[in-house]
């Protein structure tokens, strides 16, 4: 999200290969704005609290002040609105009980989210959604149906398991049928949950 924010400030969607200096100046502008308006220290960029403060409607409004085009500002707001509707489903221990409305809308929201990323923000995703993103967007409802919860499977702890996830895919999923995607996802979930 930080990268999308800084790219929108620099209007990357209409540029070809911006220089590192340009990118650095947009990042500096974003950091300065977040510091000033939200008291967010970019030093904390990688920690969970930073991400939680960044992924809010309030943060998007602050970022939008630096985005030149009204159309792009609206797209950013929409992206965050959808994200915030999906998030309770990832965070809940038992989504069917705790946030049934968001769970009902989840498939629609995740489809809309993916559509936005692969169209409006396609400069970042090359018109393609990564495997990882597809996994955290598309397979949530059926996992909840089967397990009752997705645990820590799509939350911040996810990052630590990415290498393992890729290793499982390379070692098992391609060569033998012993490890289906479901097994890989369960392994991933085990490594990321408390």
Image (cartoon, helix red, strand yellow):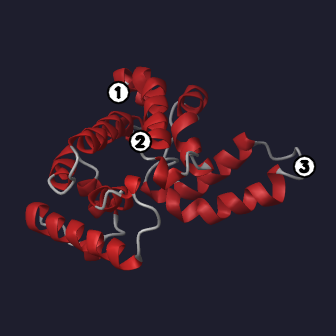
Outermost residue on the left side: it is 36
The one of 56 and 87 positioned closer to us in this rendering: 56
User: Which residue is at 47% across, 53% downward?
Assistant: 123
- The residue where tag 3 is placed is 176
- For the residues carrying marks 1 and 3, which lies nearer the camera in this image? 3
Q: Answer yes or no: is residue 56 visible.
A: yes
Is residue 161 shown left or right of residue 27? right
Pointer 3: residues within 10 angstroms few (<14), some, or many (20+)?
Answer: few
Earlier-in-chain disc, 1 versus 2: 1
Pointer 1: residues within 10 angstroms few (<14), some, or many (20+)?
Answer: some
Q: Give the Cα separation between the discs numbered 1 and 2.
A: 29 Å
Q: Position of residue 128 (x, y in %)?
A: 58, 46
The one of 140 and 15 positioned closer to us in this rendering: 15
Q: Position of residue 20 (x, y in %)?
A: 40, 77
**Quarter of the image with the N terminus in it:** bottom left
Q: Are marks 1 and 2 in contact (CB under 8 Å)?
A: no
User: Which residue is at 23% across, 66% downward?
Assistant: 30
Is residue 8 shown left or right of residue 17? left
- The residue where tag 1 is placed is 99
- For the residues carrying marks 2 and 3, which lies nearer the camera in this image? 2
- The residue where tag 2 is placed is 120
Residue 92 drawn above or below residue 157: above
Question: What secondary structure is found at the residue carrying circle 2?
Answer: loop
Q: Position of residue 179 (x, y in %)?
A: 81, 47
- For the residues carrying marks 1 and 2, which lies nearer the camera in this image? 2
Q: Give the Cα separation between the discs numbered 1 and 3.
A: 38 Å
């Amino acid at each position: 999200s930080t990268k999308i924010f800084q790219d929108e400030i620099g209007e990357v969607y209409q540029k070809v290969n911006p220089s590192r200096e340009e990118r650095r100046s947009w990042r500096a502008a974003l950091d300065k704005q977040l510091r000033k308006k939200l008291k967010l220290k970019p030093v904390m960029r990688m920690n969970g609290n930073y991400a939680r403060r960044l992924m809010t409607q309030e943060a998007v409004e602050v970022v939008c002040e630096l985005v030149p085009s009204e159309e792009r500002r609206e797209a950013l707001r929409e992206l965050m609105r959808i994200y915030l509707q999906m998030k309770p489903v990832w965070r809940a221990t038992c989504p069917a009980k705790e946030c049934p409305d968001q769970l009902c809308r989840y498939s629609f929201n995740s489809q809309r989210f993916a559509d936005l990323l692969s169209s409006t923000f396609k400069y970042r995703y090359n018109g393609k959604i990564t495997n990882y993103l597809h996994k955290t967007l598309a397979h949530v409802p059926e996992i909840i149906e089967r397990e009752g919860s997705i645990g820590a499977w799509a939350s911040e702890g996810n990052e630590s398991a990415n290498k393992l996830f890729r290793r499982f895919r390379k070692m098992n999923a391609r060569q033998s049928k012993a490890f289906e995607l479901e097994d890989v996802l369960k392994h991933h979930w085990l490594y990321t949950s408390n």
